[in-house]
Amino acid sequence: MIAAHTVEDVRRTEAAAMAALPPGTLMQRAAAALAVACADVLRESAGGVNGRSVVVLAGAGDNGGDALLAAARLARRGAAVTALLTADRVHDDALADAHRAGVRSRPWRAGDEDVCAAADLLLDGIAGIGGRGGLRPAFEGLSAVDGPAVVAVDLPSGLDADTGAVTGEVLAADLTVTFGTAKPVHLLGPAAALCGRLLVADIGLTDLPAAAVERVEPADVAARWRRPRPSDDKYSRGVVGVVAGGPDYTGAAVLAVQAAVRAGAGMVRYVGPAHPSELVRHARPEVVAGPGRVQAWVLGPGVSPDDPEQRAHVREALRGGEPAVVDAGALADLPALGPQHVLTPHAGELARLLGADRSAVEADPLTHARRVHEETGATVLLKGTVTTVVGARVLTAAAAPAWLATAGAGDVLAGILGTALAGLRDPHDPEAVACAAADAAVLHGRAAALASATGPLAALDVAEAVPAALTSLPGWDAL
Ligand SMILES: NC(=O)C1=CN([C@@H]2O[C@H](COP(=O)(O)OP(=O)(O)OC[C@H]3O[C@@H](n4cnc5c(N)ncnc54)[C@H](O)[C@@H]3O)[C@@H](O)[C@H]2O)[C@H](O)CC1
Ligand SMILES: [K+]
């Protein structure tokens, strides 16, 4: 897991650390890490540091201070550094140090985007964890600057550190160097993509509280995924019940079932009409047709709002209280839910649940997913390039390959997640449910990466790649 902490927690921890250290120590540590990272980037992209041109954008806060101190260090290594000051006042001591090192500075002027574009490296210290609301109008043109390698100090300026909300123009970075711990912005969509590569520099912050957001890594999935033990039988491994598809949407039933089987369910039951039941059995002869006892449900893929029979099966399944994936057609008319129920909307479906705009959800997935979690009590898995899970924990899965934006991919995710839920040791542990949801999303993305290695993928390919995705997880063999 990669842990991220809120601004409030970072500021509190930072204050405690600063009280025990000579003034300016933390900023010097941050600047030292920043300068080393910038030098690495310059060597890679421009062949060296000496004589290379660096433009530093320095704002009013400590973020600008970090950038100016890093500018001084780069100038001492021979770089030609210009500091463009984006605020009337900047960190005095840091600016004085930069000047002593030979950095030239002047206030930002209209048209300075051209100066930035001509640099080998652009260091963004306009605003850090105190920033939000997108770049201010005078700097909006920076978002179109193309050419230099861009390194963001702590986070790309204009992003909201706690939510990752993108509400205006942002200077996208190739590398973001953050201090002490990641912030939610680095792990959440759509902001994570604007951060580029992430480097968490150690500045000696200790005693951080519990993380606010965590990114689940493939090794975490390997450690948690339920594997058969010698004492297991097909029931103890977890039976997944699938209420999916109907006479009109037969494919969703096949895809969800296929994925649940391939993710390692002990048994899969399919509940639905004769057609597509016979298609499901044709695709997966192991599947048992008809209702019965299950450890977890997959409800809703391909279930039409005009299908009273399948919708009655969904309602009946939810009454049982077992963990369930609540997807697509099951997202309408939600009954009372608990954390063992995982809603799996995409941005459009989540927007409908809230009566909000899809674009607002896409710009700030965490805030909107959190609202649905608070209103329903269910665990929410919001699908997107980056998947966000909000329940007893807030978890993300790193960006999945864009090839996964294909019909039926969501049905496959629902099947994988059904198997993850059916394998839970304690299905009423809300944290375990949130982890299962994120694990399924990571596995889904990994299967998509394998399935798209040879070109465009189809959803069924993703389901079929799940076993290989599991065995390729780092640490899978060691367990
Ligand atoms: N442990 C740590 O995280 C450390 C962090 N350091 C650095 O300090 C900054 C946070 O500094 P702070 O002064 O609190 O806030 P900012 O630098 O973000 O500046 C706020 C400043 O910027 C203006 N502003 C806000 N939004 C925008 C915007 N969209 N565009 C332009 N200007 C904006 C606002 O008005 C304020 O005046 C942290 O990020 C680290 O870089 C320490 O140096 C080391 C320890
Ligand atoms: K910044």
Image (spheres, grey):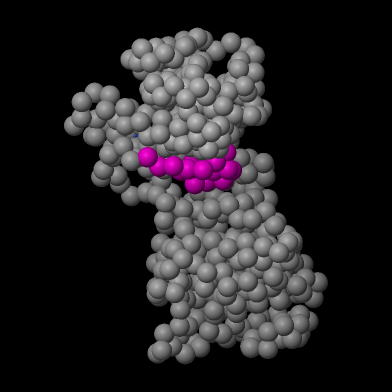
Residue pictured at 41% horizontal, 85% vertical: 229
Left or right placement of residue 154 versus residue 290 in this view: left
- Viewer-proximal residue among 243 and 63: 63
- Indicate the quadrant containing the C terminus: top left, top right, bottom left or bottom right: bottom left
- Viewer-proximal residue among 145 and 327: 145
- Viewer-proximal residue among 450 and 374: 450
Magenta-colored stretch includes residue 198: yes
- Indicate the quadrant containing the N terminus: top left, top right, bottom left or bottom right: bottom left
Residue pictured at 73% horizontal, 61% vertical: 455
- Viewer-proximal residue among 356 and 237: 237
Q: In this view of the protein, can residue 172 be seen by the observer?
A: yes
Residue 153's place in the image compared with 290, above or below, is above
Q: Position of residue 148 (x, y in %)?
A: 59, 29
Q: Position of residue 88 (x, y in %)?
A: 46, 10
Q: Which residues are magenta?
A: 184-201
Left or right placement of residue 25 versus residue 411 in this view: left
Left or right placement of residue 332 versus residue 336 in this view: right
Q: In this view of the protein, can residue 159 be seen by the observer?
A: no
Residue 235's place in the image compared with 429, above or below, is below
Magenta-colored stretch includes residue 168: no
Residue farthest to the left, as pictured? 20
